[in-house]
Each structure stands twice: as structure tokens, then as C-alpha cells.
Image: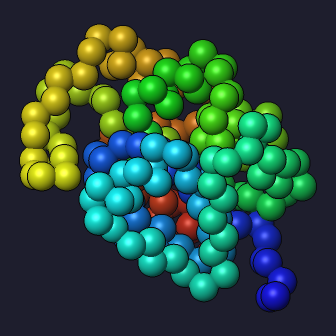
């Protein structure tokens, strides 16, 4: 087995379909990346009939343990950046209120505790959105609480919340330039 290079990107996938395919393509363009996949994200991969085409050396951690064992990697400087994209309103709410009961919410919490910069692509950021469902485009109307939680998350230390795919791309590019990768 090849030695894993560190520090690396950590990318957490939730069960949101909002720009899901585009996020998978972005993951494929990163070097030295580990993927944290929630139970819901595993379902969405199948619903959207997507294959995970990961870069060489990528590792995949699935939400299968009660203690979210892979979060320990954050303690040892394995990650320079965590990306949570796309992030469901459920994940955002749990992060805002400090609930760490899934792999994704646990890695978010540990990244914060270890001062690892985090980028969150929150899905529910406008009163009306168009998003891709498995059978095509649909309109969604995020609830007031979802919009408030996305705003609250913006106040978290070392956390950048992006609202569009273009913002996510620009923020990733800026982070790459900061890291000189």
C-alpha cells in the first residue's frame, strides 16, 4: 500500500442532490483527498446514478461506526481543509447547534476543534431555488429556519459558507492558491 501524503483535503458528502453531480466532479479534480460519505449520500449516489471517479490515492470513509472513528485523523494534522458539499439543511442545522451524531457532523465538529479551515456549500440559502432532483429540475422553497441556520453558520470560526456553485469553485481555487497546491 502506498504511503498516504498529508496534509490532504477532506470532503464530506451529505444526502443533498443540490449540485451533487458537480460536487463529485470537483472531488475528482483534487489531489490528496479523502471522502467522508454519509448514509444518505450513499443513497443519493445511487438515485442520481453516479459513479465515484476519485483521484488515485483517495480514501473513502463511510458512516458505519457509532463513534465516527475516522474523525481521529483530524487530531494528527491529516487535513488542511474540510469541504462539506453539498450540505443539507439537516446537516447545517446539526452543525449550527453542535449536534455531532453522523460522520459528516462529527468531521465538521472535529475540524472546528482542530482549527482546520472548513468550506460549507449550504443548499438552502435563498427563499426560492431551482435544484436537480433524480428526474429533473424542481423548485424548492427553503423554510425560514433553514435560511437562518445557513446565516448562523457563517459566524463560525474558520468556516466559509458558500451559496452557489460558482462561489464554491472560487473558494476552492483560492484555498488551493493559499496552500500552493
Q: Is residue 65 visible?
A: yes
Q: Residue at x 48, y 60 (%)?
A: 172
Q: How is the image coloured?
A: rainbow
Q: Is residue 178 visible?
A: no
Q: Is residue 165 left or right of residue 99?
A: left
On the image, which quarter does residue 121 sit in?
A: top left
Residue 116 percent across, percent down from the top left:
72, 46
Q: Is residue 27 left or right of residue 175?
A: left
Task: For the N terminus, give its image quadrant.
Answer: bottom right
Q: Residue at x 75, y 37 (%)?
A: 66
Query: How many numbered discs, if any?
Result: 0
On the image, which quarter does residue 144 sit in?
A: top left
- In this rendered view, identify the residue nearer to me: 114 or 173: 114
Q: Is residue 29 left or right of residue 133?
A: right
Residue 3 percent across, percent down from the top left:
84, 83
Q: Residue furthest right?
A: 76
On the image, which quarter does residue 90 sit in?
A: top left
Residue 15 percent across, percent down from the top left:
41, 43
Task: For the C terminus, give its image quadrant.
Answer: bottom right
Q: Residue at x 46, y 43 (%)?
A: 40
Q: Residue furthest bottom?
A: 2
Amino acid at each position: 500500500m502506498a504511503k498516504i501524503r498529508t496534509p490532504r483535503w477532506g470532503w464530506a458528502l451529505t444526502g443533498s442532490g443540490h449540485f451533487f453531480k458537480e460536487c463529485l466532479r470537483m472531488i475528482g479534480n483534487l489531489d490528496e483527498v479523502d471522502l467522508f460519505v454519509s448514509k444518505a449520500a450513499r443513497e443519493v449516489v445511487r438515485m442520481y446514478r453516479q459513479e465515484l471517479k476519485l483521484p488515485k490515492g483517495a480514501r473513502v470513509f463511510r458512516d458505519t461506526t457509532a463513534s465516527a472513528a475516522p474523525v481521529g485523523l483530524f487530531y494528527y494534522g491529516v487535513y488542511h481543509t474540510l469541504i462539506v458539499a453539498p450540505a443539507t439543511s439537516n446537516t447545517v442545522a446539526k452543525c449550527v447547534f453542535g449536534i455531532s451524531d453522523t460522520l459528516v457532523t462529527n468531521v465538521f465538529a472535529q475540524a472546528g476543534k482542530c482549527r482546520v479551515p472548513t468550506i460549507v456549500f449550504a443548499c438552502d440559502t435563498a427563499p426560492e431555488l431551482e435544484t436537480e432532483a433524480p428526474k429533473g429540475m424542481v423548485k424548492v422553497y427553503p423554510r425560514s429556519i433553514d435560511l437562518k441556520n445557513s446565516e448562523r453558520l457563517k459566524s463560525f470560526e474558520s468556516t466559509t459558507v458558500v451559496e452557489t456553485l460558482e462561489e464554491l469553485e472560487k473558494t476552492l481555487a483560492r484555498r488551493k492558491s493559499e496552500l500552493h497546491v
